[in-house]
Amino acid sequence: MLQMTSDDIVDTYETMAVITDQMLRAASDSDWDRLAELEQQCALHVRQLKEIEPQPLAGPQRVKKVDAIRRMLAADRQIRDLTTPWMAHLSALINNTSTERRVARAYGV
């Protein structure tokens, strides 16, 4: 298992919070490619955290971790609010294209 100090763990959570803020900016700008890149960066940090031996955090470190998690959750809610309409539009386009193909195959158009 990977070893990380308590400070490393807190730094990782804070880095993820910064990345999540950047994801929110990308979603606000409708920069979907950038959003996807940032999601991959964040996922790397999540994997790092999953690979470590859990270390209980106390005092200020625990407060910093909880603050970072709260920031990530708040940004995530806003990102979902921004991406849901886009995803619905994309789904409609895909379904429309799929329907057009089925009609074309059925009628030899």
Image (cartoon, rainbow, N blue to C red):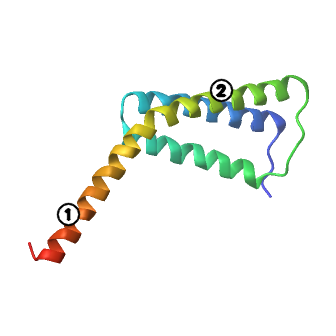
Q: CA distance from mark 1 to mark 2?
A: 43 Å
Label 2: how many Cα within 10 Å (few below 14, some 14–19, many 20+) = some
- Judging by the rendered image, the residue that carries numbered circle 2 is 71
- Judging by the rendered image, the residue that carries numbered circle 1 is 100
Which residue is pictured at 45% across the width and 27% down the height? 25
The amino acid at mark 1 is: Glu
Asked if residue 99 lies left or right of residue 40, the reply is left
Q: Is residue 39 above or below residue 65?
A: below
Which residue is pictured at 62% across the width and 28% down the height? 74
Q: Is residue 88 above or below residue 94?
A: above
Which residue is pictured at 43% across the width and 33% down the height? 27
Report the number of discs.
Answer: 2
**Residue 93: x %, y % from top left:** 28, 51
**Residue 29: x %, y % from top left:** 37, 28
Q: Quadrant of the N terminus?
A: bottom right
Say which label, 1 or 2, has the lower sequence index: 2
Question: Which residue lies most toward the left here?
Answer: 109
Q: Toward which corner of the image does residue 13 lie, by quadrant?
A: top right
Asked if residue 25 lies left or right of residue 91, the reply is right
Asked if residue 32 lies left or right of residue 69, the reply is left
Q: Toward which corner of the image does residue 67 lie, by quadrant?
A: top right
- Secondary structure found at label 2: helix
- Secondary structure found at label 1: helix
Q: Nearer the viewer, mark 1 or mark 2?
A: 1
Residue 71 or 91: which is nearer the viewer?
Answer: 91
The amino acid at mark 2 is: Arg
Q: Is residue 22 above or below residue 33?
A: above
Which residue is pictured at 85% across the width and 48% down the height? 54
**Residue 105: x %, y % from top left:** 17, 75
